[in-house]
Amino acid sequence: MNSIMGKSRKTVQIVILIAVLIIGGYAIGSTLFAADDKGPLKEGDKPPAFNLVDLGGESRQLSDYEGKAVVVNFWGTFCPPCVKEMPEFERQYAKWKDQGLVILAINLSEDTLTVNNFVRRFDLNYPILRDVNRKTERSYGLKSYPTTFFIKPDGTLMEIKVGGMTEVEIDERIERLLKL
């Protein structure tokens, strides 16, 4: 009789354990991976606000650039297409900054020494922001790097480009963005 009670008790314990794991896993998963109710960003959307610190320690918010054409580029030194694009963005910044172009390059949580060495190596002069906790990356729904957001002066997205671009492709998009 004890053998039957023991097996029955063990079965109930296993069922309870599985139920707890399923319910707990669902609760944790829905909290960690919950996207806001808007879903992924698309052209015409207003990009999420952010407040990040640049390499000089200055706080920068997307709202600081209202009324301007803004390019937000998520990048990392570990990403070959990102490394190729950064000097190309620098040349575009030099070409268009006097016409009001803003480029904000958001580094994907790399250490300060790595980022500073990279910026010095390529003599980058546009703002490099640090997404240390990757909160901004998550709010923008990044899936791969680089990803670049072209934001019109009215604050809405003209285009989202996933993957690397040539300098000509960057230039064409910026020219179109500045005409809006």
Image: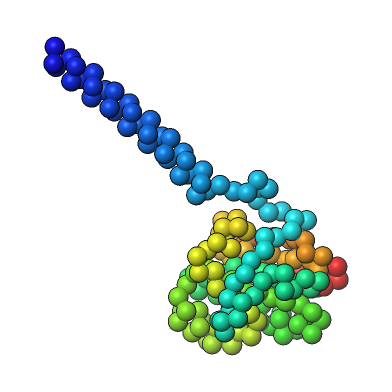
Left or right of residue 66, residue 56 in this image: left
Query: Residue 129, how many percent across, how many down?
Result: 59, 75
Residue at the image position 73 percent from the left and 66 percent from the top: 150
Residue at the image position 71 percent from the left and 80 percent from the top: 92
Left or right of residue 41, residue 138 in this image: left
In what quadrant of the picture does the C terminus appear?
A: bottom right
Residue at the image position 61 percent from the left and 77 percent from the top: 59
Residue at the limit of the structure toward the top, as seen here: 1
Q: Is residue 164 visible?
A: no
Observer-nearest of 121 and 165: 121
Residue at the image position 79 percent from the left and 79 percent from the top: 100
Residue 28 placement: quadrant = top left
In what quadrant of the picture does the N terminus appear?
A: top left
Q: How is the image coloured?
A: rainbow
* Tally of numbered tags: 0
Residue 9 placement: quadrant = top left
Query: Residue 126, how many percent across, how many down?
Result: 65, 81
Residue at the limit of the structure toward the left, as seen here: 2
- Position above or below: 96 against 38: below
Left or right of residue 105, residue 172 in this image: right
Observer-nearest of 22 and 150: 22
Q: Is residue 20 visible?
A: yes
Observer-nearest of 106 and 23: 23
Residue 169 placement: quadrant = bottom right
Query: Residue 3, how many percent across, how many down?
Result: 14, 17
Query: Residue 111, how many percent across, how many down?
Result: 45, 75
